[in-house]
Amino acid sequence: MKLVILSGLSGSGKSVALHTLEDLGYYCIDNLPLFLLKDLVLGLRKAALDEAFTNTAVGVDARTNPDELRLLPELVRTAQERGIDCRVIFLETNTDTLIKRFSETRRKHPLTRGDRSLGEAIQLERDLLEPIRSCAGILIDTTQTNVHELRDRVRGWLVGSVSPKASILLQSFGFKHGVPQDVDFVFDVRCLPNPHWQPELKPLTGRDPPVVAFLEASPEVQRMRDDIQSFLAHWIPSFETDGRSYLTIAIGCTGGQHRSVYMTEALRRFFEGDGHKVIVRHRELP
């Protein structure tokens, strides 16, 4: 089991970091009471053994009972002694930057109240979270860090310098039924030879061997397939580096039955061979 404990000052980017962990496949729980985290570590919660909890990330902030916060370093040691890969990330930012961020967003600091200024609330939070900071395996100062850089640092610490593979949704469609919305790339393969005009192929689809053989006999189809694969292989890593976890690629022909289906299945094999998680939808097929 892998357990990441994420904490830090309010306004330092904990939500961004937690969302990054979620994109990496972690089951994320924000502001979990530490007595429940203790049950998780000690194996008293059977859910901790479920596959869904294999990679778990827990957000802890200053709203937690101060007495429980002081016990966190011991809890981390207990987890590591029990064979749990337990890591602690702590985010911090200088006070002037935090005050500016709260002023710009007009959000209320969780520890402010009538007789406590924002600066005093930030200092109180620092004091309360010191036990977590003291046992953190990595400290990230986000004073001069933007959202993308923070995501990269969290990913780099957990999975190394290589960005995780994006999940790919491939969708075939027919232009005569409309172009799908909310897609990242659209490729038009209507220029390729059309099996529709072959009487024996017309009732079949791009998944059927006779249609596949017909299309793969065409050099144009092979060039189109290779060009699309080369383009995507070149540019998708840039999207992954930028933090994209999901990409949707649509392939269209006239009716969405032959050419687009064939090309979508070819891309499925290509991406699966490259280690991507792939989902395929043929919009016009029953």
Image (cartoon, grey):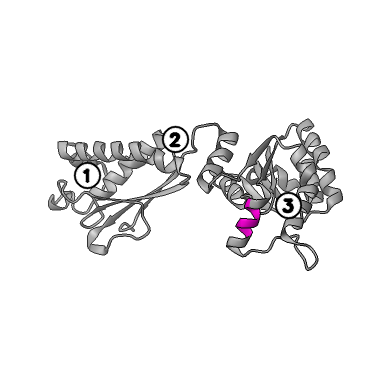
Q: Is 212 one of the magenta-colored residues?
A: no
Q: Is residue 107 above or below residue 156?
A: below
Q: Residue at x 36, y 55 (%)?
A: 183
Q: Residue at x 58, y 61 (%)?
A: 104
Q: Is residue 82 above or below residue 24?
A: above
Q: Residue at x 66, y 47 (%)?
A: 94
Q: Are marks 3 and 1 in contact (CB under 8 Å)?
A: no
Q: Nearer the viewer, residue 94 or 54?
A: 94
Residue holding disc 2: 275
Residue holding disc 1: 211
Q: Amino acid at mark 2?
A: Gly
Q: Earlier in the sequence, mark 2 or mark 1?
A: 1
Q: Is residue 153 left or right of residue 36?
A: left
Q: Nearer the viewer, mark 2 or mark 1?
A: 2
Identify the image quadrant of the N terminus.
top right
Q: What's the magenta region?
A: 97-102
Q: Amino acid at mark 1?
A: Val
Residue holding disc 3: 61
- Write down the quadrant of residue 103 in the picture: bottom right
